[in-house]
């Protein structure tokens, strides 16, 4: 803070006191104006990620990364390089490995005891013995975060689950996800970690696969299990919102990760990648995404570049 603003005049007596009081009030006004002209943590941001006072939306998720894919411009960033548990965002990498292996999507696989997970968040609607195509399993894993489906996909990879996890980590390295580490295909393990910047690369890679685009953004999908038809719905409320044009998305939640949401969407004619991690409450991540979209729509493409204001 400039030293001259700290040297506020102090009153003495008579007319002199009145003038000095006026000067002191003016000084205090300037101090308050300066205090409110910056946001907490502004000093920690690099110039490339800075924003004008009051320009940034109020994001409540603990970690955020917003990228304009076309210009490679980081529009918002908080804890961008900090690795944290990512829950079912993991399933985007699971899908990339399955698609990359070119395994037939019409091959029928069976849910077994090996696919049963235990602990909080391990609920599944697919009973042991369920037989579904690889495509159906991938569909409900991406759209509804079906954990047994994701585990069965990894288990039926050539070489089994250990080889599948190794392929996940190899793909992460190939994408430049330097802080990422995977130990299972479901995301139920808190040891599956990545930074927001890492996940932006994963989202972009997933968005280039038409199958992942479709499966992750479908509102619902029905599968035949024995004599019953099971209907699965998308865990992301935004895919049903006509105001959004979402190309690929994934939600996630475990206690260690909090509520998570990643997506690539067309906003104002631009391909925007949004990563929101460790949100609290049921709707915070959705509300944060809405605030980001409205913030971007209120600015022309060239006006949203950090530091240009």
Image (cartoon, helix red, strand yellow):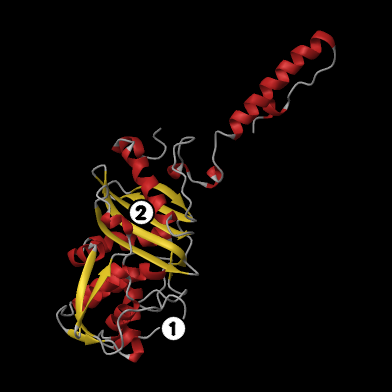
Q: Spot the residue most to the right.
A: 13
Dot 1 or dot 2, earlier in sequence: 1
Frontmost residue, 132 versus 42: 132
Residue 40 is situated, as x and y percent measured from the top left of the image, at: 56, 44
Q: Is residue 137 left or right of residue 304?
A: left
Residue 228 is situated, as x and y percent measured from the top left of the image, at: 21, 81
Tell me the distance, in whole angstroms, between the alpha carbons under discs 1 and 2: 31 Å
Q: Is residue 205 left or right of residue 304?
A: left
Give the position of the C terminus as an image quadrant.
top left
Q: Which residue is mark 2?
A: 274
What SS does tag 1 mark? loop
Instruction: Note whether residue 100 is visible.
Output: no
Q: Which residue is mark 1?
A: 118
Residue 204 occupies quadrant: bottom left
Q: Spot the residue most to the front.
A: 227
Of labels 1 and 2, the one closer to you = 1
Residue 135 is situated, as x and y percent measured from the top left of the image, at: 19, 76
């Amino acid at each position: 803070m400039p030293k001259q603003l700290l040297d506020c005049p102090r009153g003495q007596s008579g007319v002199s006191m009145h003038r000095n009081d006026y000067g002191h009030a003016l000084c205090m006004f300037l101090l308050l104006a300066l205090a409110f002209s910056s946001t907490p943590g502004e000093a920690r941001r690099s110039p490339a990620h800075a924003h004008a006072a009051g320009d940034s939306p109020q994001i409540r998720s603990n970690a955020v990364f917003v990228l304009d894919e076309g210009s490679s411009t980081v529009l918002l960033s908080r804890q961008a390089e900090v690795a944290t548990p990512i829950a079912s965002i993991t399933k985007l990498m699971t899908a990339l490995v399955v698609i990359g292996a070119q395994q037939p999507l019409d091959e029928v696989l069976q849910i077994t005891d090996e696919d049963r997970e235990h602990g909080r968040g391990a609920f599944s609607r697919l009973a042991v013995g369920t037989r579904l195509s690889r495509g159906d399993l991938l569909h409900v894993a991406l759209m509804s975060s079906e954990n047994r489906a994701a585990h069965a996909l990894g288990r039926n990879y050539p070489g089994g689950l250990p080889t599948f996890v190794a392929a996940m980590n190899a793909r992460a390295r190939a994408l430049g996800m330097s802080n990422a580490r995977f130990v299972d295909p479901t995301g139920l393990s808190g040891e599956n970690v990545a930074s927001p910047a890492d996940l932006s690369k994963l989202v972009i890679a997933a968005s280039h696969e038409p199958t992942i685009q479709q499966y992750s953004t479908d509102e619902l999908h029905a599968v035949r299990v024995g004599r019953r038809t099971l209907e699965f719905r998308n865990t992301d409320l935004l895919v049903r919102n006509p105001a959004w044009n979402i190309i690929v998305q994934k939600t996630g939640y475990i206690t260690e990760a909090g509520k998570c949401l990643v997506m690539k969407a067309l906003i104002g004619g631009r391909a925007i990648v949004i990563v929101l991690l460790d949100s609290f409450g049921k709707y915070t991540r959705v509300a944060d995404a809405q605030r980001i979209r409205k913030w971007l729509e209120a600015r022309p493409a060239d006006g949203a570049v950090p530091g240009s204001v």
